[in-house]
Each structure stands twice: as C-alpha cells, then as structure tokens.
Amino acid sequence: MIPLAAVVVLVEALALLGFAGTEVVAEPSRPMTYATAGLLTAYALGQAWAALLLLKHRIGARGPLVVTQLIQLGLAWNSRDSDLEWLSPVLVIAAVVALVGLLAPSTTRALVAAERVPE
C-alpha cells in the first residue's frame, strides 16, 4: 500500500506544479499570481519529498501526508460548487485512495518494521 499512496501523492504534487505554472501563464501581471504560484510550488515539493521518504519507509513522512490529504478533502468540499464540477470528485478520490494507502495496517507494519532495523 505504500507505493500506491506515494504514487497518488506524487501525481498530486505534479498537478499542483502544473497548476502553479498555469497561474503564472494566465495572470502574469497580477502580483498575487507569483505568491500563489510560489505557495503551490512549495506545497507540491513538500508533498513530493514526503512521498519519496515514505517510499524509503520513513515513518515520519506519514503524518504530513495524512494532513495534506485531509486538507485536500476540505478543498474538495469547498470547490464542490465551482465552475469545474469535475474537480471536487477527483480531489476526493485521490485523497481517499492516498489515505487508505497511508493508514492501511500493512503500511503501519512496514513502517514500524523499517524503523526497528538499524541502517
């Protein structure tokens, strides 16, 4: 389940980077565009870093990833009435799949076992 959760999070990170890029291209003269793009980029890079740490069986990576998925569920709820009617279900599906992978008993066993093995 660890690879599934990590792949979903990495795809989310790539989507965030793409969204940051489209923001800059769509509204280059607006000052807040660069702040938004910077925030989205930092968020995406943080998610990608945590997903890579999860693939290395670092138990500390799971907490931040769970938090980001819960934030994503809130964003899905907030975007349910937007013009992009497909966005909310996609956010929910991705977050639920990632959460199932992150919180699965097999994931917990693998992370705990990896923490016990000295490097």
Image (cartoon, grey):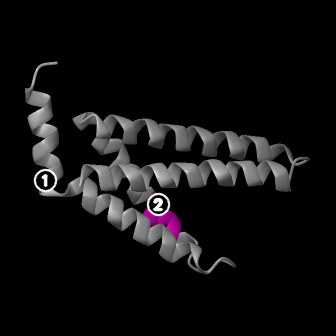
Q: Is residue 39 magenta?
A: no
- Which residue lies under the disc numbered 1? 106
- In the rendered image, which quarter contains the C terminus? top left
In percent of width and height, residue 54 lies at: 30, 40
- Relative to 98, does residue 30 appear above or below in the rendering? above
How many C-alpha atoms fall within 10 Å of the one at disc 1: few (<14), some, or many (≥20)?
few
For residue 91, the mark is none
Given residues 99 and 57, the one toward you in this image is 57
- Residue 1 vertical position relative to residue 115 in the rendered view, above or below: below
The residue that appears at 70% across and 45% down in the rendered structure is 37
Magenta stretch bounds: 72-76
Q: Residue at x 11, y 38 (%)?
A: 112
Q: Which mark is residue 72?
A: 2
Q: Amino acid at mark 1?
A: Ser
Which residue is more in the foreground, 80 or 85? 85
Residue at 52% x, 49% y is 13
* Label 2: element kind: helix
The residue at the point 47 percent across, 60 percent down is: 72
Q: CA distance from mark 1 to mark 2?
A: 23 Å
The amino acid type of the residue labelled 2 equals Gln
Whole-percent x and y of residue 20? 69, 49
Residue 14 image point, x, y percent: 56, 50
> Residue 74 magenta-drawn?
yes
Principal SS element in the magenta part? helix
